[in-house]
Amino acid sequence: MSEALAGLQVPAVPAAPQDGPQDGPEERLARWTAGYAALPGLPDELVSADGTLRPAWNRFLHRLADLPEGEIAARLAAAGRHIHDTGIAYRAYGEATERDWPIGALPLLIEGAEWQAIAAGVAQRAELLEAVLTDLYGEGALARAGLLPAAAAAGDPEFLRPLVGVPAPGGRHLHFYAADLARGPDGAWRVLADRTQAPSGAGYALENRLVMARALPEVYGALDVERVASFFQAFRDGLAAAATRAEPRIALMTSGPYSDTYVEQAVLARYLGFSLVEGDDLLVRDGLVFIRTVAGLKRADVLWRRIDGDFVDPLELNPASRLGAPGLVEALRAGAVAMGNMPGTGLVESAWLAASLPALCERLLGESLLLPGLPTWWCGDPVQRDAVLERFDTLAFRPAAAPAQGAFTSRAFGEGRDAAETERLRAVLRDRPGDLVAHEPVRLSTAPVWDGTRLVPRPFALRVFAAATPEGWRVMPGGFCRISETPDVRPVAMGAGVRAADVWVLSSGCTAAQASLLPAGDRVAVRRVPGLLPSRAADNLFWFGRHLERAEAVIRLTACLLDGAGSVSMAEEDRATSARLRTLLHAWGAVPSTEGPAVRLAHHALSDGGQWGSGLAHALSARRNAAALRERLSGEAWRALSALRATLEAPAEGPDSEAALLDRAERALSLTAALAGLAQENMNRAGGFAFVDMGRRVERAINACRFALDFGGAGASTDDLGVLLDLVDSRISYGARYILGVALAPVRDMVLLDPYNPRSVAFQVGRLAERLAGLPSLRQDGVAEVPVRLVAGLSGEIAAAEAASLSLDRVAEWEMRLWGIAEAIGARYFPGGSDAARPESLTTLA
């Protein structure tokens, strides 16, 4: 693996020998596959039992070999940079930081005819589990008939009693289902685990497809790979069909930016056109579910749940939950909102059910199970327990009610047990046998990956997704593949030693059907407003703008400190100006003290993430706000944010010089300007732009007031006034207007009162008034809301002020009033409690 690609977690394609001419496609293919041998006793995706390449892989590798190896490596490196720069990431369980998404260089290939059998089995299994859930939360006939163990179901923590008897809105408990599959030693596909709680991975499957199609468009197009867009369209239609209103509002309910899979949830929300909401965004009132938005409460018709079922409602389910919304279960009970999947669907993930599924399929569907699971025994049944005891040493064990662990645990693979573990298991089998399930050890088939020079077999597991639609279950033609990087590492979870792979289903016809998520032309209604803006999203947009402006202000202060202020031979007034710069940086938390060389202080101010007020700290805060807005920010904005962070971070080698720090500051200012330009030119004016812009404007006005107070006093020196102009980026404008040099009144006017200077306080207040005027009002009585009144009052005072007679006390008062305006904007548009209001509906107007 090349060093450049290794850092981006994209496997390198083997390079041709450097000491001779480039070999041709056939020689290249022979070199890639030389020595490839499947693991003994296991089927392999690349080679058949007779050692020949399978047809799909033969077609793929020949197409790949037609491309120059250097070009393939360059494309994959570009794919890695795309993943990093656009923030396609995940968080391993228990980790606080994100990792770049580790996509592999090769897809998993499946022929169309084989996929049809997989899809039929997955759809049947989804329908079976839906029928089981309907009974478990309804009549309970299956338990009475002895077809499933009542004790196991009733004692399962995923059995949510408040949901018993609650009719599923739309008639379905399951709207989205996933199955983890692997080939058995006989070559047949088996189900390792059912995913019904809140199946993850579909968004990553979509990203995998977009990245691989971008990296290898010729190969992708030539193989007629089945498209996935129609699957997502059908899923969206299925959720809409569960609602009671003709044009429902659908939201994806997330646990927030610290969810392990938040990035894919944002991808899905953006791709499907759903609102991305957290529990705090929701409010149940008058039996209906509302989303808190900047335009007041807006009704939600369907929630696609991506949090655990018992966390949905702290009133009736888990009282410790901070992820749900009080009253949601009551709204479900009343049929006021549909939810996919319904709370409690995680019950059928539990291991105890697997032993009963073959018989349940015969009883409920009248047919045999097309995709069986691993041979499984629930030890709570005496007959099954006796069978387990006879084969105790050869079986794997796991808790009967542990759906989160699924089949991917070290014990599931049949690893050896020591004496203590053996004794513990036997004690459980004796005292509480119903707590255990035994099954045949998992043996995963293999698929090819690059090891840096050739193809090698590695274990893999495949996740397949199914969606409930008005026409029945629809299976995604593809999926999400976990594949190990080493022969002895199982694909347990995304993390060390495991990569993701795209799944290409090759069309069984002449050409794969072209599909798009866009509706047909005759179904498109013209709309200029992009949709509701949740209050939480507006809050993050507002603070995104504020943190970027704070970062810029600190960077400008640092640049002024470095630009001659660190000289030991400076004049007394220069030293006074430098002291003011140091004091302000310290007051803002950018430097630990005011003492020391300017270079050391500048390093802290720019690159010390431990200083809460440093440029890097503010850039990271802006990035955290952006992480909660992934569905609203463009790829260009994310790349600029990543570049700003990388620019501000100190290099690992050697101390910084004054020139290097000044260069870093200037490059960082260019990136903050780029981010401001992206917001100005790319963000829809009817979307979240107003809040990003208001955040920047209010922060810029506050900073300009502070700069004027520190550097624009009555006794300000020439250096003070020059620094003041630099801090508000107005030196060029001033020089074009005034030829005789800096003077106090003209500088104050340009910094504070000039409505034509885009950096002045007057200009910021004017833009705040414009943005507020364009936002929706909750009142229809013509009375201005609080933020509008506060801005109007301040705007009038600034317009009436004169620079020559302006006192600093007045400027300090303006600064405090700007803080008050920021708080008023938050109180009006970002309510976090039950005080969110609905828009007035006046009926007394003629």
Image (cartoon, rainbow, N blue to C red):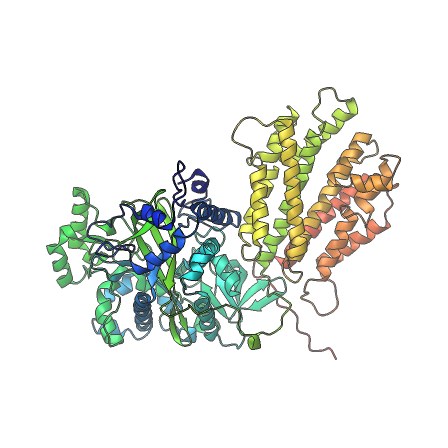
Question: Residue farthest to the bottom?
Answer: 846
**Which residue occupies the foreground of this view, 399 or 175?**
175
Q: Position of residue 618 (x, y in %)?
A: 60, 42
Left or right placement of residue 395 versus residue 272 in this view: left
Report whether residue 709 is seen: no
Residue shown at the point (51%, 49%) measured from the top left: 82
| Position of residue 600 measured from the top left corner of the image (x, y, whole percent) | 61, 27
Give the image quarter of residue 597.
top right
* Residue situated furthest front in the rendering: 21
Figure quadrant of the N terminus: top left
Q: Report the quarter where the C terminus lies.
A: bottom right
Residue lying at the far left in this picture: please name it. Answer: 390
Left or right: residue 222 versus residue 187 is: right
The reply to whether residue 621 is visible in this rendering is: yes
Given residues 796 and 215, the one toward you in this image is 215
Residue 428 image position (x, y, % from top left): 19, 52
Q: In the rendered view, would you say 421 is above or below 685?
A: above
Quarter of the figure with residue 330: bottom left
Rendered view: 143 above or below 729: below
x%, y% of residue 476? 39, 65
Left or right side of 763 for 231: left
Tell which of 144 and 99 is nearer to you.
99
